[in-house]
Image: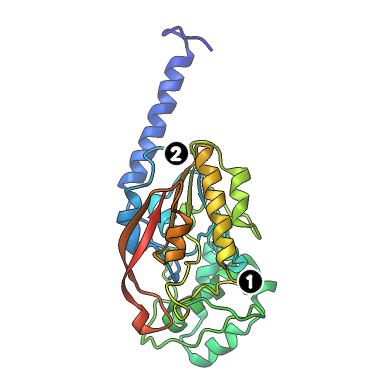
Amino acid sequence: MSTDPTSPDRPARARRKAERTAEAELREDAPRTKPFLKWAGGKRQLLDQLMRYVPEKYGTYHEPFVGGGALFFHLTPPRAVLSDNNARLVRAYRGVRDGVERVIRLLRDYPHDKDFFLSFREHDVDRDSDAEVAAWLVYLNKTGFNGLYRVNSHDRFNVPFGRYASPNICDEDTLRACSRALADTDLPLDEDFGSVVHRARKGDFVYFDPPYVPLSASSSFTSYTSAGFGLAAHERLRDVALDLKRRGVHVLLSNSSAPAVVELYAKGFIVERVAAQRAVNSKASGRGPVTELIIR
């Protein structure tokens, strides 16, 4: 490559740099997109603390436990890979990304009605299109008890009907904003979180927000899939995060402040305690201020 300051390549490179800077500034000034789902363990309440540790510059953004995607939608990175072990959730993201107008048309027709809810939650949604899966999940999320997503051992959604006077079942503006944010995002299906080891490159940014280690035997709420997520999986996650850090990938994790988590990340990581407001819990007594960990 020529280093001559009069080279014709130099103005072109300068122009491309200016365009990238302008795009970044537009993203920074744009209103923040909010998630289209309310998700147990969602990170909207922790965004200010998380943003302190987001690298100023990074390559591709990876989030292997996307859940509600609060940090992703807040950042709206130009290159991202989002995945989750909940296949219906990933398909819902695909439906919003690729067919948001179809999702909106479906949601407009769904009534806020207990009998409809109970029938609809039994629907064999896995046979449907991504847009139909998205509409099914959004509807149950907006009308089910406390916005929970929970399945039994047969992968059947089993959350009861919620007590809402007038839920916003079809938030068109948010759905369209999320669709725009997802436009160039990769959404691999049926992928284990460990796959990020083979994809992430030096300088990329990986955020892990796994199902939390419970603070007590009664506080666990991690049944997002029929397979669950136990301590052995958390140990493997720790090893994956350490491998990525050693290869120059920016890594950020969040988890509960359970003693098992503190012990898991005692070596090779910096652990910060932060106050969080937990809004989604199957019991009212479990909602409110809690201490969580941000790990890097």
Please tell me in which quadrant of the rendered image residue 129 appears: bottom right
Q: Nearer the viewer, residue 203 or 124?
A: 203
Q: Is residue 221 visible?
A: yes
Marking on residue 227: 1
Q: Badge 2 local density, few (<14 within 10 Å), some, or many (20+)?
A: some
Marking on residue 58: 2
Which x, y percent locates residue 47?
A: 34, 57
Answer above or below: position of 157 versus 268.
below
The amino acid type, in three-letter code, at marker 2 is Tyr
User: In what quadrant of the picture does the N terminus appear?
Assistant: top right
Marking on residue 166: none
Q: Nearer the viewer, residue 119 or 278?
A: 278
Q: Is residue 185 visible?
A: no
Answer above or below: position of 83 versus 21.
below
Q: Say which element carries label 1.
A: loop
Answer above or below: position of 201 versus 239.
above
Q: Say which element carries label 2.
A: loop
Residue at the (40%, 88%) spot, across then down? 163
1 vs 2, front mark: 1
**Precedes in sequence: disc 1 or disc 2:** 2
The amino acid type, in three-letter code, at marker 1 is Ala
Identify the residue at the far bottom of this view: 115
Which x, y percent locates residue 17?
A: 41, 27
